[in-house]
Image (spheres, helix red, strand yellow):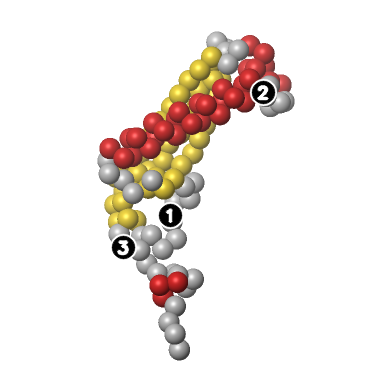
Amino acid sequence: MILTTTNEIQNRPITEYLAIVTGGASSWVGRQAVKGFKINLDIPSVATKVVSDLHERAGVALIEQAREMKADAVVGVRFELSHGPSDMATVCVYGTAVKFGQSVPGPNDASEMRRT
C-alpha cells in the first residue's frame, strides 16, 4: 500500500477516487507530558513514545480501511495531533483512497531505455 502526502504519484495515473479514509488513536499522556505540548513543544520522552505509538496505530487503521476498499494507494495523507484538558492525546490521519490505471513509463524508466 502506497501512502503519500502528495495528491498524485509520478507515472501512476489515478483512475478512480474511492473515498476519504481515516484512522485515529487516543491515549492518556499524563499531565507533565501534556504540559510540554503547551509550553514550547519540548515534549518529554514518555510523551514522544506515546505519540509515536498513536501515529502508528492511526496509520494502521487508515491502511486497513483502504485495503477493505481494495485501494492501490492513499494520497493526500495528513496527520493531526491534538490534546485536551484530560491529559489525552489524539492522533487523527486522513487521506483519499485511490486506484491506479496502467503505469506510464517515465524518462528515467529502465524499461524505456533503447539500445542504439
Q: Is residue 18 visible?
A: yes
Which residue in the rendered view is the most extreme toward the bottom? 116
- The quadrant of the rendering that contains the C terminus is bottom left
Q: Is residue 67 left or right of residue 94?
A: left
Q: Is residue 75 above or below residue 54?
A: below
- Disc 1 on helix, strand or loop? loop
Q: Residue 102: which numbered mark, if any?
A: 3
In the rendered image, residue 32, in percent from the top left (x then y), is placed at: 67, 13
Q: Amino acid at mark 2?
A: Ser
Q: Residue at x 33, y 49 (%)?
A: 72
Q: Residue at x 71, y 21 (%)?
A: 39
In the rendered image, residue 41, in percent from the top left (x then y), is placed at: 68, 27
Q: Is residue 92 visible?
A: no
Chain-order first, disc 2 or disc 1: 1
Q: Amino acid at mark 1?
A: Glu
The residue pinned by badge 2 equals: 45
Q: Residue at x 54, y 14 (%)?
A: 28
The residue pinned by badge 1 equals: 8
Nearest to the eye among marks 2 and 1: give it. Answer: 2
Q: Is residue 10 above or below residue 28?
A: below
Quarter assignment of residue 24:
top left
